[in-house]
Image: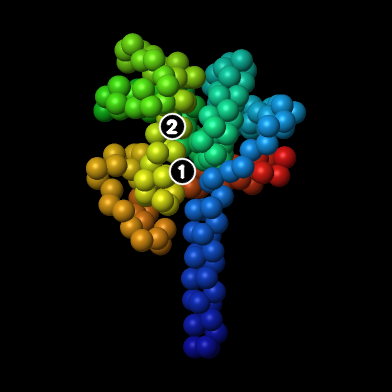
C-alpha cells in the first residue's frame, strides 16, 4: 500500500510538471496567414461566446473575435489565453469599469494606457477611449506580451497583469510562480477554451 501511494504521488507530481511546461509553451502560438483560417477560427469564437450567453450584439462579438485573433497573431500569443483574460477581467463587457478605475474588455487603467499607448501604437485621448474594443484589445495584448517576455512564464505574467509588474518578482521556473486566485481563474478558463476552440497552429 505504501509503494502504491508513493507511486500515485510521483505520478501526480509528474502530471503537474508536464501541465506547467505545456502551459508555458502553448500560449505562444504560430499563426498561419490564410484568411480562411482566420474566418474559421473567428466564427467558432463567436459561436462559443454566444453559447456562453455573452450579452452583446453579434456584430460586436465578431469585432471582438477578429481583433483578438489579429492582435494575438501579431504578438504570437494563443488567442484563447487573451479570451480567458477577457472573460475573467470583464466577462466580455466593453463598458466594464472596476472599483480601481480599470476599463473595458481587458480592464486597462488610464494611467497604464498613457504609459504604453505609444509602444502599442494606440492613440488615447481620454479614459473613454478604453471602452472602444479595438483600442482596449490592442493595449491589453501588447501589455500581456510584454509581461510574458519580462517574466518568462505565464503564471507570473498573469499575476503581474492583475497586480502590476512592480509587485511581482521574477522566478526561476513556472513551478515557483505565484498561483493566485486571478491566475487560477484565467488558466481554468484557458483550459476550457483550449478544449472548445481550435488550436491556431493546427488550422
User: How far from the left and from the top, in percent, is residue 12?
Assistant: 52, 70
Question: Is 30 situated left or right of 77 in this image?
Answer: right
- Say if 174 sits above or below 9 in the image: above
- Number of labelled discs? 2
Residue 168 at x, y = what percent?
28, 48
What secondary structure is found at the residue carrying circle 1?
helix
Q: How far apart are marks 1 and 2 (CA)?
A: 18 Å
List x then y, in percent, for residue 95. Answer: 42, 18
Q: Nearer the viewer, mark 1 or mark 2?
A: 2
Determine the residue positioned at 31% across, 53% down: 170
Residue topped by disc 1: 186
Q: Are marks 1 and 2 in contact (CB under 8 Å)?
A: no
Pointer 2: residues within 10 angstroms few (<14), some, or many (20+)?
Answer: many
- The quadrant of the rendering that contains the C terminus is top right
> Looking at the rendering, which quadrant does residue 79 occupy?
top right
Residue 38: percent from the left, percent from the top?
68, 29
Which of these two is toward me, 142 or 131? 142
Do we see residue 181 in this rendering?
no
**Quadrant in which residue 69 is drawn:** top right
What residue is rendered at 38% in x and 41% in y? 147
Residue beneath disc 2: 142
> Which image quarter: residue 50?
top right
Which residue lies at the image location 61% right of the left edge and 45% below the top edge?
194
Callout 2 secondary element? helix
Above or below: residue 108 compared with residue 157: above
Task: Please tell me which of labels 1 and 2 falls first in the chain.
Answer: 2
Amino acid at each position: 500500500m505504501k509503494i502504491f501511494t508513493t507511486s500515485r504521488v510521483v505520478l501526480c507530481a509528474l502530471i503537474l510538471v508536464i501541465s506547467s511546461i505545456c502551459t508555458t509553451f502553448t500560449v505562444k502560438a504560430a499563426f498561419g496567414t490564410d484568411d480562411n483560417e482566420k474566418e474559421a477560427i473567428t466564427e467558432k469564437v463567436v459561436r462559443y461566446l454566444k453559447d456562453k450567453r455573452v450579452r452583446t450584439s453579434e456584430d460586436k462579438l465578431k469585432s471582438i473575435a477578429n481583433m483578438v485573433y489579429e492582435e494575438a497573431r501579431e504578438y504570437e500569443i494563443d488567442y484563447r489565453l487573451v479570451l480567458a483574460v477577457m472573460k475573467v477581467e470583464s466577462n466580455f463587457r466593453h463598458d466594464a469599469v472596476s472599483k480601481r478605475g480599470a476599463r473595458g474588455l481587458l480592464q486597462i487603467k488610464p494611467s497604464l494606457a498613457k504609459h504604453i499607448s505609444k509602444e502599442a501604437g494606440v492613440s488615447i485621448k481620454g479614459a473613454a477611449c478604453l471602452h472602444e474594443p479595438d483600442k482596449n484589445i490592442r493595449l491589453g495584448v501588447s501589455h500581456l506580451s510584454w509581461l510574458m517576455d519580462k517574466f518568462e512564464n505565464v503564471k507570473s505574467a498573469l499575476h503581474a497583469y492583475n497586480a502590476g509588474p512592480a509587485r511581482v518578482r521574477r522566478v526561476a521556473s513556472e513551478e515557483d510562480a505565484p498561483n493566485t486566485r486571478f491566475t487560477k481563474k484565467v488558466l481554468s478558463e484557458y483550459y476550457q477554451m483550449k478544449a472548445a476552440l481550435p488550436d491556431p497552429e493546427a488550422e
